[in-house]
Image: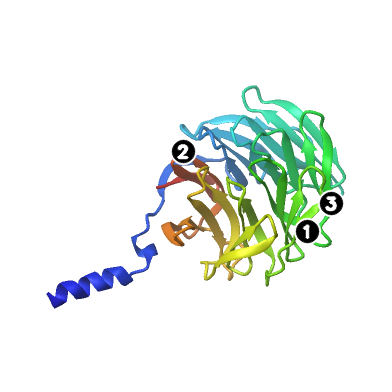
Amino acid sequence: MRLNIAVVMLLCCLPITVLAQSARQEKTIDLPSGVSVEVSSVSPAGNLIAAICSDHVVRVWSAGSGDLVRSLQENSGLPGGLQFSNDGQLLAVSFETVKYEKGMIKVFDVASWKVQTDLTSECMFCAIRFSPDRRRLANAGNFFGDSYVWDLATQKKVATISPPFGGSSALSFSSDGKLIATADGDGFVRIYNANTGTLRGTPTEFLLEPFAVAFSPDGKSVLAGGADKVISVIDPENGKISRTIPKQAGLILSFDISRDGKLTAVVYQSSQSMLDANHIMLWDLDREAVLADFQKSGITITGGAFVGNHYVFAAASGNQLTLWAIP
């Protein structure tokens, strides 16, 4: 009897991550010799994956078969960032046209691969995000430069966001498209009115630079994280941190939140090596429980998205791109 009680007590004390699931490999895509993937975007529709490759070509593959669907060589400069819209019908790709000075964003219709929108501005862009209704597009230039919110129908800027220093490494729209949150290089997360660029709130509790930011689907909270290895939950109404989840596995590089808001995928980077972005966890943040934990040496996680009940992500290794799914 005492032995049974001891076993039960031991199991109850085990960390949740011991029982967590891992990822399963779904597909391997071979690139030309000497070519590797630098950054990728998985379509939330689950049918495509797009990537910027080291030869400056944007390639698009079928997520199901692994076949190459399209190579986008626009002669528009060096590609720097890309993102599918929430419905997977549009793909935005940013290009640096004049080094450190000018850039453009082209928005492709995935059905025809024709350029639907062409946006030109005075700086290069790294981070790109569509509003949930895909009527607007926000971009950020890392390390320097302003961020902009564009109306895709008119191809005009509706808001300019100017962080004091260091640019923005990530941004996220609220579910209604009225607010936008940025993770800024000067160590702050800022929340703006997406229609005017007016600052709404600035949490000041961050000790180190934030790298990732994401609105919850209900718009009631913003997740932020970065070099301090803490997931912070921010109230967008007052800009204050309402809750923190400390002791993360590494530097926080990105967040993806499921459409029902119940799950969050977090990609981590090793604090010892800036190249080791090879660790991902799937969280139930309400319970502060890790549901899946995957880490593999020799790969770099380049992008991902929730597709139905699964989180699908891509990882680069040499001239191969592998697709993984959790659970």
Quarter of the image that includes the N terminus:
bottom left
Q: Is residue 210 visible?
A: yes
Q: Which residue is mark 3?
A: 100
Question: Does 207 sit left or right of 273 as displayed?
Answer: right
Query: What is the C-alpha distance between the residues marked 2 and 1?
Result: 35 Å
Question: Image point 69% across, 66% down: which residue?
Answer: 209
Which is in the foreground here, disc 3 or disc 1? 1
SS for callout 2: loop
Query: What is the C-alpha distance between the residues marked 3 and 2?
Result: 39 Å
Report the amino acid beneath label 2: Gly
The first of marks 3 and 1 along the sequence is 3
Question: Image point 58% across, 45% down: which residue?
Answer: 217
Question: Image point 52% across, 48% down: which residue?
Answer: 261
Q: Which residue is mark 2?
A: 308
Q: Which residue is mark 1?
A: 143
Percent x, y of residue 173? 68, 45
Judged from this view, the residue extending furthest toward the top is 112
The first of marks 2 and 1 along the sequence is 1
Proximity of marks 3 and 1: CB atoms separated by less than 8 Å:
no
Question: Does 170 sit left or right of 256 as displayed?
Answer: right
Percent x, y of residue 11? 27, 68
